[in-house]
Amino acid sequence: MINKQGLWFVTLFSLILVLSIYYVTIKDDDILQIATNSVVQEEKVDSVVKTEDSSILVSLRVQDEEEMLEEIEELQTILLDDTASLQEKNDAYNSLQTINATQGKKESLEKKIKENYNLESFVKIKNDQITVTIASKEHNSTLANNIIRLIQEEFDQKMYITVKFQG
């Protein structure tokens, strides 16, 4: 008589065996196709342009998102805290709305830089300071000035804008 442990072992072993046979028999072309699906491809009239996010930009985005999530968690704990005053809860709610608006502004600025200059970028907004990191090996002061003007047009008040080139 087979006990439950033995039955589970045979079932899991069979599943692993079937998956390993499938993996061994899959064609190399299919594996490459699956791996390259993460690369963004844009088709132009006669040419294909492949773009990938720079690892520097990805790490900056991850770091910024972690900081933002920590701040959101702190604000949410204030909102859910029964001992917090009404003013503290109101300030926390306003801060959450500001974070949302700032996040939307960052994305729109990155999209504008991509549309106007065809450059991958990372934008960080903190109060009245904006830091733009461009994924480019070429350090061009004219381009930096044009990007600063483009970003300043989006704001009514004077912003302190810094452009960095990483490549």
Image (cartoon, rainbow, N blue to C red):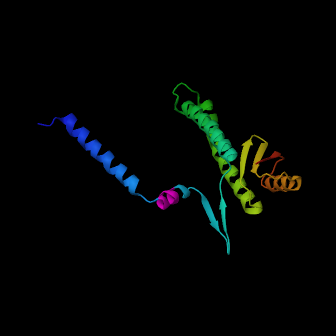
Count of all numbered marks drawn on residues in the image = 0
| Magenta-colored segment: predominant secondary structure | helix
Q: Does the magenta stretch include residue 137?
A: no
Residue 38 occupies quadrant: bottom right
**One can see residue 144 in this view:** yes
The residue most toward the left is 1
Residue placed at 59% from the left, 38% from the top?
69
Residue placed at 84% from the left, 47% from the top?
158
8 or 106: nearer the viewer: 8
**One can see residue 90 in this view:** no
58 or 36: nearer the viewer: 36
22 or 127: nearer the viewer: 22
- Across and down, in percent, residue 71 comes to 62, 34
The stretch of residues the image draws in magenta is 28-34
The residue most toward the top is 83
The residue most toward the bottom is 45
Q: For this view, does 56 lie left or right of residue 149?
A: left
The relative height of residue 163 versus residue 82 in the rendered view (above or below) is below
- Across and down, in percent, residue 25 comes to 39, 57
Q: For this view, does 158 lie left or right of residue 8?
A: right
- Across and down, in percent, residue 35 comes to 53, 55
Q: Quadrant of the N terminus?
A: top left
